[in-house]
Amino acid sequence: MNGDPGSAADRENVHRWNAGRDPEAFTALVRRYDPALRRVAAAVLGSAARRDPGLLEDALQEGYRRMLDALRGYRAESEPFVFLAGVVRRACLDTLRKETRARGRTERAAAFGESGAGESRADPEGEAERAILADRVLAALDRLAEPDRSLVYLRDAEGASVADLARAFRMPEGTVKSRLARARTRLRGMLAEEGVEP
């Protein structure tokens, strides 16, 4: 997402929303980033979202509700996506705290992701292998503590810059880099234990 030419239009939509609560501006932001924010929510919620897909929808709706006011705090210091992902991340963590208090953890029941349905008809064996690999990577990612889980996901899966992450997480860039390095090492170790080639 970093360096995306749409960022100027996104900043303009943030300005329009903050200046006059223009619903079209907010809708444009949500429409543009919804797929990526769904992936962020799935990564933060981890196995809980795969057990209960409704949990992801609840967390995402809460995130979008919070954005209505949170956008007033956007100062264009980072890409709009990273700012919005931070709002969704906090909503997901709050939703997860409520969910884990309400019920205990159970086995994974659903595969992650909705993409690749067309590919599966063309290459069902390859698609099955990719799904298994994705599930193992996500299971390992799920074992990382916050904020490392979100940092790794936003950097490696969504392409957020270190500078944007530093601003969004209120950490020095050096801290973000060192946390990423340690988290990736742990992730590789967990995957190696599962016999997955990192």
Image (tube, rainbow, N blue to C red):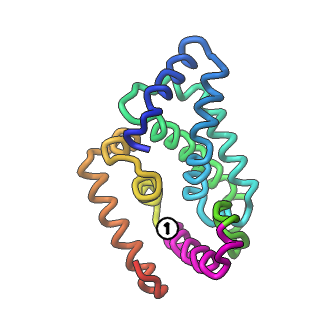
Vertical placement of 165 versus 136: above or below? above
Badge 1 amino acid: Leu
34 above or below 148? above
Q: In this view, does 54 lie above or below 51?
A: above
Q: Is residue 165 left or right of residue 141?
A: left
| Residue 123: in magenta span | yes
Res 166 → quadrant = top left
In percent of width and height, residue 59 lies at 66, 47
Q: Residue at x 46, y 62 (%)?
A: 145
Give the image location of residue 180, x and y in percent: 34, 60
Please state the horizontal and vertical placement of residue 164, each as a whole percent of the image: 36, 41
| Residue where numbered disc 1 is placed | 141
Q: Residue furthest front?
A: 122
- Badge 1 marks a residue whose secondary structure is helix
- Residue visible at 40% across and 77% down in the picture: 198
What segment is highlighted magenta in the picture?
Answer: 119-143
The picture quadrant where one finds residue 32 is: top right
Prevailing secondary structure class for the magenta stretch in the rendered image: helix
Q: Residues within 10 Å of mark 1 (few under 14, many from 20)?
A: many
198 sits to left or right of 17: left
Identify whether 139 is placed above or below 146: below
Residue 116 image position (x, y, % from top left): 64, 64
Q: What is the quadrant of the N terminus in the image?
A: top left
In the image, is residue 74 part of the stretch drawn in magenta? no
User: Front-most of 128 and 67?
Assistant: 128
Looking at the image, which residue sits at the far top? 20
Q: Residue at x 26, y 47 (%)?
A: 173
